[in-house]
Amino acid sequence: MRWSAGWHGGTGRDRRPAEGRAVPGLDTTWTSGWPPERIRAVTDEQATLAVIGECGADDAQLRNALPVVRARGWRLLTRWPGSYLVVAHGGSRLAVIGDLAGQHPVYYRTDGAGTWWATSASALAALDGAPVDVTALAAHLAFGQPDVLATRSLFREVARVPGGHLLLIGPDGGGVERYEPVAYSPVALRQQGPVVRAALSEAVAARIDSRPASADLAGLDSTTLACLAAQRGPVTAVTFADERLRDDDLSFATRTAATVPNLTPHKVPGAPGTVYYSGLENISALPVSDAPNAYAVTASIKRAVLDTVTEHTTGPGVHFTGAAGDAVLSAPSSYIADLLRERRHRRAWQHALVHARLRHTSTFAVLSRARPASRIDLAGAWRHTATALRGSARGWIPQAQRPMAWTPLLASADWMTHGARLMLAAALDEAAGALTDAPARLAEWTERQDLARVGANTAGWRALALAEHGIELAAPYLDNEVIRACLAVGADQRGAPARYKPMLDAAFTGSGVLPGFILARTTKGGFNSLAYAGLRENAPVLKDLLGPTSRLAALGLVTEQPIAEALSRASAGQPTAQGALHLVVAAEVWLRQLASASSTWWETVSGHVAAT
């Protein structure tokens, strides 16, 4: 596993990451598992700046940023293309800055002697065997929004830096400080199109070097990245085309590859085992991750794609994926609540009318779902949700039929014991009381949380690609500058239901990058059939995983009967709480991996093992 860590404080430090490499100019900052070319540092007599990861800044740009470090212009250090961690030291203070989407998360713990920080919460927990924070794990399962409990990580005594914040460590210890605005100044869609195109182009270019390049070639989002990469050289393009999907990804991929130079297409046909939940009877075959991640459930599908890449490239390279494209290029219909809040009733009606047609329901039904969220702020919504948690568990209905909410209660919340629900309600009330600088719009909160969730999950996929294939996974839609460029456009423009992905149309029409038939596409593939096939075929494994020996059950975070009912519905081909099952299974796998992991995280300065 790749991770970085550091110490800032007195002379009491007696440990360092096992097999860690010190970052030049920062003797108490180390990296583990990162190749040397992805670690760069510059220094002068007053400041040191290091970037770890895929950073598009050249050495001259890094040197020219040293005055920015001295002036504490932290946000400017996050504006280069790519996805990277920043460590900046000036005077008596050290700033550790992750990215906006959690590809490089930052955690810390402070004692009287100083502060340890790391990009791995598990590593910091291993300093003294800190246990899992059951309340934080309950929030992860019940809400799926990483910032609800702010600085609480999944381990006790280990704090996390929330999205848009940095860790600033000084003589008095460490604390978080916001560097990203809660909301961006709005820009019109057409005006922002060229900015989005430039940000995506630079994000792709930052990863193109002598390594073989490959890319998913499926929906609009991944196709855009594949075509941008093909402008710079040969690209091995792969399309997962299992016959059970019954979508048109393969036909569009074939047509695109025939039109765009440098794209060589390959079909990934799928197999009986390429379904959700395959292989979970042997979780030791999965890479250990720092947090629960969705790709534990879809690993067999990802392995099939990466196997095809490996077969058709000359060696390990960089693979582009469209992960998070939906989160930045479009918007969920919850933005209608914001239109109602701002009394933009005519626009709300127009958008609700089209959403209703697409979902075969009435305009009044769409507006009725949005109205409750339009009348409450984030803190009030959390208090309302805490009250619901103190009541009885609900019967299951699809989330799309429930009222829109700032922090929706997922079906997994109804699978917990009453005691666990009360514990979570108390934490949510506390979080509401401590909330500061909350976004005014529901869409602004939701889209940041969606990005953080996708970012954490993509880290799991990246671990799989590196561990088993040596392939570097690139997810440019999660880059800081791409996020900023896209989210500057209002959600009601990005998510306008009358057009599919209008942001891509504004960015690439007439550019020569994407064929016109791609920009005109209105369809999107989905994996529902493979999810239900996996639920049916792997039901015995899932029942065993979440049965009497379940780690989650021992913590009160699942109960047997609702899980059995959900699996029975799926086995019968009936709709069920897929998303909640996905979260629960991934969390159970993670807990079991924690219990059996034999990783050595730290060593004493003299070389003896200090913690595992």
Image: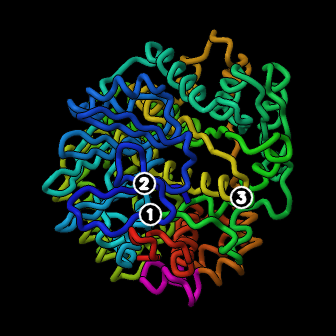
Say which residue appears at 50% left-offset and 52% top-offset.
Answer: 400
Q: Is residue 135 magenta?
A: no
- Secondary structure of the residue carrying tag 1 is strand
Amino acid bearing label 1: Pro
Query: Which one is in front in this view, the residue at disc 3 or the one at disc 2?
Result: 2
Task: Give the percent coordinates (x, y) of residue 431.
Answer: 23, 61
Marks 2,1: beta carbons within 8 A: yes
Residues shaded magenta: 546-562
Query: Which of the 4 image quadrants contains residue 98?
Result: top left
* In this picture, residue 152 sits left or right of residue 558: left
**What residue is disc 2 on?**
30
* In this picture, residue 38 sits left or right of residue 182: right
Say which label, 3 or 1, has the lower sequence index. 1
Q: Residue furthest front?
A: 606
C-alpha gap between disc 3 and disc 2: 24 Å
Say which residue appears at 46% left-offset and 40% top-offset.
Answer: 84
- Secondary structure of the residue carrying tag 2 is strand
> Can residue 3 be spotted in the picture?
yes
Task: Give the percent coordinates (x, y) of residue 598.
Answer: 56, 77
**What residue is disc 3 on?**
468
In this orientation, which residue lies closer to the viewer: 608 or 105?
Answer: 608
Determine crowd level at label 3: few under 14, some 14-19, many 20+ residues with C-alpha closer than 10 A: some
